[in-house]
Image (tube, rainbow, N blue to C red):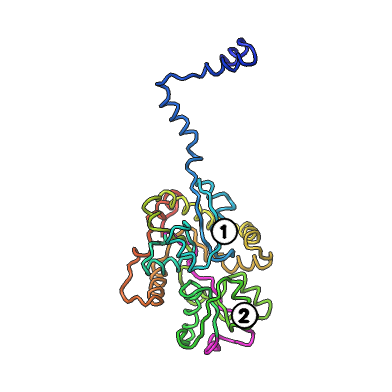
Amino acid sequence: MKWGHREKSVGVGMMRKRSFTSSFRLHPSCFPVALLVFLFAAGPSLAVDRIRIAVSNPNMPNLTAAMAQKKGFFKDENIDAEIIRMNPNVAVTALSTGDIDYCQLFGAVVGGAIAGLPVRVVAGYLDNWPMTLIAQPELKSIRDLKGKTLGISSFGATPDVAARLMIKQSGIDPEKDIKVLALGSDAARLTALKQRVVDVVVISPPADTQMEKQGYRILARAYELFSFPYLGLGTHTRKIKEKPDEIRRVIKATIRANRLIRDNRDEAVRTLIDWGKVEKEFAYASYDALRNLFNGDGAVPEEGLKLVIDQARHSAKVTREIAPSEVVNLTFLREAQAELGIKAR
């Protein structure tokens, strides 16, 4: 009230401007306090971390980051996230060089760590693989694949590993009895199947349902044969040292996203349709097939991790034992779980 009364008593124009300015002149001793007030007020905006997260495809298995972005969970943690599609080998290289901050490709990050790259898994999103072998209509079973050609994303990536494990389950040696072509994205693999460049591809939902509708044959689904962590969160060891708080906040946001995916079918499907540009029918089919694979705590199952490590060792021809600490760091996951009130498995 005193400020308003003083303005009126001074007059208008430049006199009023000079009087207003002079009334806010600070004594030098007030500057430290004023600076603290300014920093406190500006704190949230200064704390925003801009990050880049790589995903392999805009599909149901990769939905975690997209859901965290759409529902504002990243924003709640003062994070501005950019989601980028990358092939697994490119993503892990970009992660190791610092060109991206995080990567959802669990198996590729583990393989990179075993190969000596400065990357680690810090959380898990899917406790099993949603990979499917889908083949030409005339092929009736995995055993019919002997001497055939398989289309994968890239050598050593999770789809490659999943396909080889599924084929091995049937008694066929995937190293000797199958020809393998690295074709890149889901779309490239499906095109190759349609053009009969390959006999079978390994693919994620909802593409498997779409192709089955067109007459192609589903030979096997990985999660029906074995347990194997599929997607999670990987980052650079430098970020682990320099930005542990950011990692904890990213994990919190993505755990919340996973829980929403599990608990809200319609919201998850709407997000998948908008992000993945898939038809409603296939989005629901994809959700129903994979919903139970999303965990609600970000945990990395110990036995499943051992399988991933063993497979990555085999692919890289590494003979020595690999300790879990060489590929994962779950310190920030436990902190995030505690803040969210989640009991660790």
Callout 1: SS? helix
Foreground residue, 204 or 140? 204
User: Counting other residues with Cα less than 10 Å from the Cα at mark 1, is it few (<14), some (14-19), or many (20 or more)?
Assistant: many
**Residue 297 visible in this rendered orientation of the protein:** no
Foreground residue, 81 or 225? 81
N-term-proximal mark, 1 vs 2: 2
Instruction: Return the x and y of residue 219 as percentages of the image width and height.
Output: 57, 81
Instruction: Return the x and y of residue 179 as percentages of the image width and height.
Output: 51, 85
Asked where in the image residue 284 lies, by quadrant, the reply is: bottom right
Callout 2: SS? helix
Tell me, yes or no, whether the highlighted magenta stretch contains residue 146.
yes
Instruction: Return the x and y of residue 165 as percentages of the image width and height.
Output: 47, 79
Residue found 49% across the figure and 62% down from its top: 104
Residue found 56% across the figure and 53% down from its top: 69
Vertical relation: 7 (above or below) 122: above
Instruction: Return the x and y of residue 42 as percentages of the image width and height.
Output: 49, 35
Badge 1 is on which residue? 261
User: Counting other residues with Cα less than 10 Å from the Cα at mark 2, is it few (<14), some (14-19), or many (20 or more)?
Assistant: many
Badge 2 is on which residue? 193
Vertical relation: 37 (above or below) 343: above
Residue stretch rendered in magenta on the structure: 122-148
Q: Amino acid at mark 1?
A: Ile
Q: Amino acid at mark 2?
A: Leu
